[in-house]
Structure formats: structure tokens, C-alpha cells
Image (spheres, coloured by chain):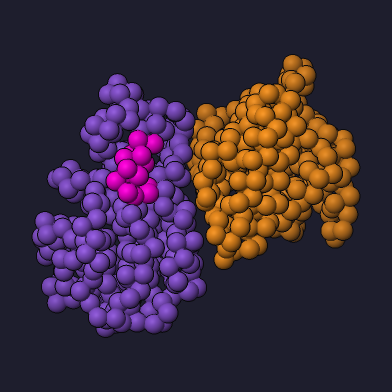
Chain colours: A orange, B purple
Amino acid sequence: MASDLLEPTVYVHGYSASEATRLADQAQTLAELLHHDTRYPASARVLEVGCGIGAQTRYLLRGSPAAHFTCVDRERSSLAQARAALADMRDAAARVELVQADLYALPFSPGSFEHAFVCFVLEHLHRPVAALRALQAVVRPGGSVTVIEGDHGSTFFHPDSPKARRTIDCLVEAQARAGGDANIGRRLFPLLVEAGLRDVSVSPRFVYADGSRPRWVDGFTRKTFIAMVAGAREPALRLGLIREDEWAEGIADLERAALDDGTFCYTFFKATATVG
Amino acid sequence: MASDLLEPTVYVHGYSASEATRLADQAQTLAELLHHDTRYPASARVLEVGCGIGAQTRYLLRGSPAAHFTCVDRERSSLAQARAALADMRDAAARVELVQADLYALPFSPGSFEHAFVCFVLEHLHRPVAALRALQAVVRPGGSVTVIEGDHGSTFFHPDSPKARRTIDCLVEAQARAGGDANIGRRLFPLLVEAGLRDVSVSPRFVYADGSRPRWVDGFTRKTFIAMVAGAREPALRLGLIREDEWAEGIADLERAALDDGTFCYTFFKATATVG
């Protein structure tokens, strides 16, 4: 497993303050859509891997008010932010343990948990099937694995714009060069099946924003999606994937889709499956 | 309005027997997803424009068992097929009037109907806003307009394939050259607003097929979507949009997405709005 620990995975979105704000906005807007049907019973032991700054964790805690969570991330600074972010939640300290560890070398015995949960993690990994097997190894047979991922290739909008699509392609390409797959959502079903999970069930979660839905236009189109693409400017330019003026035009065209007569569509995928 | 009647609109899917089978398969698979929430009250007078062979009409009749329908199409042969298709439905003869007419020159007085319904029609028109205005003109103020359209640009699948995407692009391009827009679904909100309709509300209807959903793989991916794209082979080749061998490879790659480890995604849009 040593080679896994040394795997040169690069987190394409970075760890900046604006990125932390984007992650919090994203989680708030999407919480209901993505997490409303994740409910763990009292006393259940749940493992969240790749918790980052705890953006999803607070919604997991709310949805399952009597479950116990072990939240793992490999970045010490992210865990510190997660601890601060959860400080205002009653009982959080008693119900959440934050652990610094690598997904491929989890410091837990087999069957330590009833459930495992990963959100926006597999998309960044070289070997998502190996990651799913690592999760299964610490969940007891009959327990569950829940995986939530986006799919940037699911994006479409009005007015359509090849320049805007190109900025999204740059993010996908930058993520691919870092070993990930920003279009992984559509692959969840075969990935979970290949990892040996049973009763795999995938539920698409479609986001649609138009002038009659200002909360989604602002919370998702602008503050989640466009902010995410805009955050890939530096790697996109550094990798020579696009010129600076083309980038600016593409982002402007994306912003055009957030005006009153524009529309924006994106699909997340939520997969659940049984272990063993 | 004479120029509208002479408008050289070409129905890209044609009028063949295999196309009729495709339309019936499509309607059956999608009926619940698209039509379950269309319910017209007893005695309501409903106008369906572009009813074609009646593929959607039978679901309209089932959903609103005491409403009266006037179903319009400009093709006499399609109306004859619609009449035959509805013959097995009790009361259909008493509740449905089939009328040959052009959408832009409807032979009805203002306010003749409480509701208008169009499904897979605007995508084929040069001037969808003018069409929506023509519908409004015969619906009484306070009545409703319902529009259902697909969006071929919403399609994505696993394994992804540029060749497969190219066959879809050919269909989109052939439809565009005939004056239509196969990606119209994402534009329904601004189109209905521009046409002067009130309280426009758009509801996306996402289709997802994977190995755990064989009914959708067979009924939608294969018999609806791939059959539709395959039906555009002749115009695509005639227009010189693609070579014969490229076409065959692309269709084979689409069929690859219908295997057990493939996935397929498509989005329909259903818009409702108030007249006047």
C-alpha cells in the first residue's frame, strides 16, 4: 500500500479561501437535493472518506442526528477547517471523530463501520475501483456504501456557446492530467459493480436553473459551477490548454447563461450499494 | 398567414412504418415520465396540435377521462393512423375530434379551448414563438399551454465516444437545416416568456438507463433514442455530414452504451404556462 500513499494525486480545485467559500455555498444549495435521503440509524457507525473542510459533513450530521461519524481526510489543514466549521453544531464533538489518513491505507479494522460515504472524492482518484474496495474492507457485510459524484460532461445551457464549453473542457482535461475523471458520474454504476458491491442503485440528481428559479441561478450556476470553472483558470493557462482571452470569453459566455433568459443544467449521480 | 402555410418545413424523422413503431415504443416508455401530471378536468376543451399518429394522444385521453380533445395535424395520412390507433379506446370517438390544419392557421375562434398541448412539435418549426402565439390565440385567458420537448444536446453516456456523439450531431444538424432545433428543450423557458405566456414553469424529466434498469435500456436507449438517430442515416449521408463507415461506427458505439456496463442519459423538458 506504500505506493498508494505516494501516489501523486493533485487536487485540481486547490485549497484557497475562495475555494472554501465555494465549497460551503455549493453544499448549502445542493444539500437538500443530494443528501435528503441519506439517513443513518441511531448508533450507526459511519465512515466519511475525503471529508475535506466538512462541507457535506454538517448535512450528514443533521440527517442522522444519533449516528456516529468518523471523517477522514489526508489534508491536516482541511481537517482543522472541518473542526472549526462543525464547532457550532451541538453534539458534533461527541459524534464526530476527525482522522488524518489516506483512503488507500485506512487505519481501521475490517468491519469497523456499518456504512461508508464518499462525496466528490472518486472523481479525483487514479483508481476509483481500488478506492471502493478499500472502503468495503472496513464496512461489515450487509452494510452500505454511498457515493455522490458530479459529471461535468452533463452540463448544457442556453445560450449554448462553444467557447463556454471549452472552458469546461479545460477543467475536465486538467483533472484528467491529475489522474481524475470529472465525468465520473455516468460511470458510477459500472464502477461499483466492478468493485464487487451488491444491489447497486444509481439515482441521478438533475439541477435546472432558469429565470424563475433565482436561488438556483445564484447558488448553483454562479456560485457553484461558474466559480468552480473559474477556479481552474490558473492550471488551464499553465498547462497551455487555452489562451487567456479565450478563457475570459468562455467564462463571460457561461455567465450569460445565468441571466434572466438563460438556462443551465447539470447532473449529479448518487449511488448506493450493499457490502459483501 | 399564407406564407406560413407554404413554409417548407421538413419533418426530419419521416413517415415510414418503422418510424411509426418507434413513435409508439417511445410513447409507451415515456408516458409515465412525461404525462403523469397532465390531468384536464371533466368537460375541459383541450387542443393538441401536431398529434401525428396519436402516439401521445392515447395517454392524454387516459389521464383526462372526461375531457374533450381536438387533435390537429397537417398530415392527412398521420391523422388516419391516429384514428386507427385510438379505435380500441372506449369513448375515444365521442371525446376526440381529429382535424387537418396548419398550426399557424388554426381554424378555431379565439378562446375556443381551455388548454393547449404540444409534444415534440416546436423542435421542428422555424418560428416556435409564432407557433406559441398561434396556440394562445385560440385558448381563453386563464387557460393553460403545455409544451414537451427533448434536447439531443443533453445526451451523454458511458462509454463516451466522439464517434457516437457525431451521429447525434448529424441528426441535430439535419434538423437545423430543415429549420428546426433538436436542442430546443433548454430554451423552453425563454421561448414561452417571449411568446407572452405568464407563470412559465419548466420541469426537466431526466431519463437514466443502466444495467439495473433493463426496461429503460431497451425501451429508451435502444428503441427510442438509438432508433431515432439510426433513422437519420439517409439525410445525414445525403447532406454529406458524415461518411457511411463513420456512421456505422458511431451507431455501434451508441449500442455499446446499451450493454450491461453502459449507461445512458437524456433530458426532456415539460413547460406549463398561463394564457393572457
- Residue B126, position as x, y percentages in the image: 33, 54
Q: Residue furthest front?
A: B3
- Residue A10, position as x, y percentages in the image: 74, 27
- Residue B243, position as x, y percentages in the image: 30, 24
- Whether residue B5 is visible here, answered yes or no, is yes
Q: Which secondary structure dominates the residues rendered in magenta?
A: helix
Is B225 on the left-hand or right-hand side of B15? Answer: right
Residue B33, located in which quarter of the rendered image? bottom left
Vertically, is B25 above or below B169? below
x 35%, y 28%: residue: B250
Query: As rendered, which of B210 and B21 lies closer to the eye?
Result: B21
x 30%, y 77%: residue: B138
Is B202 on the left-hand or right-hand side of A29? Answer: left
- Residue B173 in the magenta stretch? The answer is yes
Q: Which residues are magenta?
A: B168-182
Residue B89, located in which quarter of the rendered image? bottom left
x 14%, y 45%: residue: B17
Quarter of the picture containing the N terminus of chain B is: bottom left
Query: As rendered, which of A140 and B163 lies closer to the eye?
Result: B163
Vertically, is B104 above or below A208? below
- Residue B180, position as x, y percentages in the image: 34, 50
Vertically, is B27 above or below A176? below
